Image (cartoon, rainbow, N blue to C red):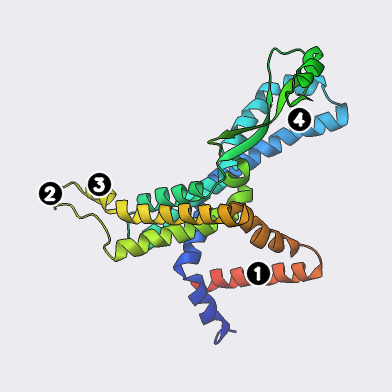
């Protein structure tokens, strides 16, 4: 084991891309933990009491302010978990190559957003419209439904939305792949000195920002073009393709004995990596 496996484990464990991914996840642990605490608190303050005491019980009504606070915390943590990881990954990977890490983080974030579906379809609640007018509005040709005890326009579309499916944990695969590749484009162009060079008299902060302009433009435009090609030929955005081709097959492995054996192997493998690096 020590002669053949440990050296291989040490080599893999010191691979800078894997280290950047690991450090990227570790860095967002505060966000992950606070979101998990908010979810757990609302389980005991809302979900379980509603199940045990029935909907609309007095305990949940009294806890509404705390439940709302937990909802705010969830929205600012779990809902943007993928985005937080993207920024962290871009930072750590750029730092490992000794190029401007802040620029790497921003470029990775921008590239991931570039790959997102910009439109949303939803039901729009018409506040102040009485339910009794539902039939007359339908007769007038409007696509109207009853939603949450109110009148709502159905299938309203709008531009400029960032959905949770892309920014949250369900978008992590896209954030990982796009964040990694976009950062590497930026890094390689920086190493090749494909940059704007300013005189030495210019402050370093300004010089570093200008140096990242060309690599950043190239990296972000690459994914803007790939996104357009994906939509044009498949009708799907990159995140949807990654979910269908990568995420779902991997989730399918979670069924049966084979997945248990695989997970045990991966756990042992990562343990060996940690031992070898230690």
Q: Earlier in the sequence, mark 1 or mark 2?
A: 2
Asked whether 57 or 131 is in front, the reply is: 131
Rendered residue at 42%/58% (across/down): 183
> Which element type, helix, strand or loop, lies under badge 1?
helix
Asked whether 1 or 203 is in front, the reply is: 203
> Which element type, helix, strand or loop, lies under badge 3?
helix
The N terminus: image quadrant: bottom right
Give the Cα distance between marks 1 and 4.
37 Å
Rendered residue at 68%/16% (across/down): 127
**Residue beneath disc 4:** 46
- For discs 4 and 2, the disc positioned in front in the rendered view: 2
Dot 1 and dot 3 residues touching (CB under 8 Å):
no
Quadrant of res 274: bottom right
Give the Cα distance between marks 1 and 3.
42 Å
Q: Which mark is residue 205?
A: 3
Asked whether 141 or 93 is in front, the reply is: 141
Give the Cα distance between marks 1 and 2.
52 Å
Q: Residues within 10 Å of mark 2 (few under 14, many from 20)?
A: few
Give the Cα distance between marks 4 and 2.
60 Å
Dot 4 and dot 2 residues touching (CB under 8 Å):
no
In the depicted structure, whether residue 122 falls above or below residue 31: above
Q: Earlier in the sequence, mark 4 or mark 3?
A: 4
Give the Cα distance between marks 4 and 3.
49 Å
Residue 224: x percent and y percent?
Answer: 46, 52
**Residue beneath disc 1:** 266
Rendered residue at 51%/52% (across/down): 228
In the depicted structure, whether residue 136 falls above or below residue 94: above
**Residue beneath disc 2:** 201
The answer to whether any part of residue 34 appears in the image is no
Q: Earlier in the sequence, mark 1 or mark 3?
A: 3
> Which element type, helix, strand or loop, lies under badge 2?
loop
Task: Name the outermost residue toward the bottom.
Answer: 3
């Amino acid at each position: 084991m020590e002669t053949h496996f440990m050296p291989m484990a040490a080599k893999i464990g010191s691979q800078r891309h894997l280290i950047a991914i690991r450090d990227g996840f570790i860095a967002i642990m505060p966000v992950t933990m606070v979101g998990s605490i908010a979810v757990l608190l609302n389980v005991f303050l809302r979900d379980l009491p509603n199940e045990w005491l029935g909907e609309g019980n007095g305990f949940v009504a009294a806890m509404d302010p705390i439940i709302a606070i937990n909802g705010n915390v969830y929205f600012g943590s779990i809902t943007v978990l993928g985005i937080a990881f993207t920024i962290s990954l871009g930072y750590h990977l750029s730092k490992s190559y000794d190029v401007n890490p802040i620029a790497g983080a921003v470029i990775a974030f921008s590239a991931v957003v570039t790959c997102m579906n910009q439109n949303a379809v939803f039901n729009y609640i018409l506040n102040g419209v009485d339910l009794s007018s539902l039939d007359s509005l339908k007769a007038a040709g409007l696509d109207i439904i009853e939603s949450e005890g109110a009148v709502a326009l159905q299938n309203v579309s709008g531009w400029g939305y960032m959905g949770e499916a892309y920014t949250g944990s369900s978008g992590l695969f896209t954030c990982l792949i796009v964040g990694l590749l976009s950062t590497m484009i930026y890094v390689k162009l920086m190493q090749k000195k494909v940059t704007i060079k300013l005189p030495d008299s210019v402050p370093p902060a300004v010089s570093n920002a200008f140096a990242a302009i060309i690599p950043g433009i190239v990296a972000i435009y690459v994914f803007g073009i790939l996104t357009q090609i994906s939509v044009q030929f498949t009708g799907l955005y990159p995140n949807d393709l990654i979910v269908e081709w990568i995420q779902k097959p991997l989730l399918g492995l979670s069924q049966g004995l084979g997945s248990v054996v695989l997970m045990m192997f991966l756990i042992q493998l990562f343990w060996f990596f940690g031992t070898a690096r230690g």
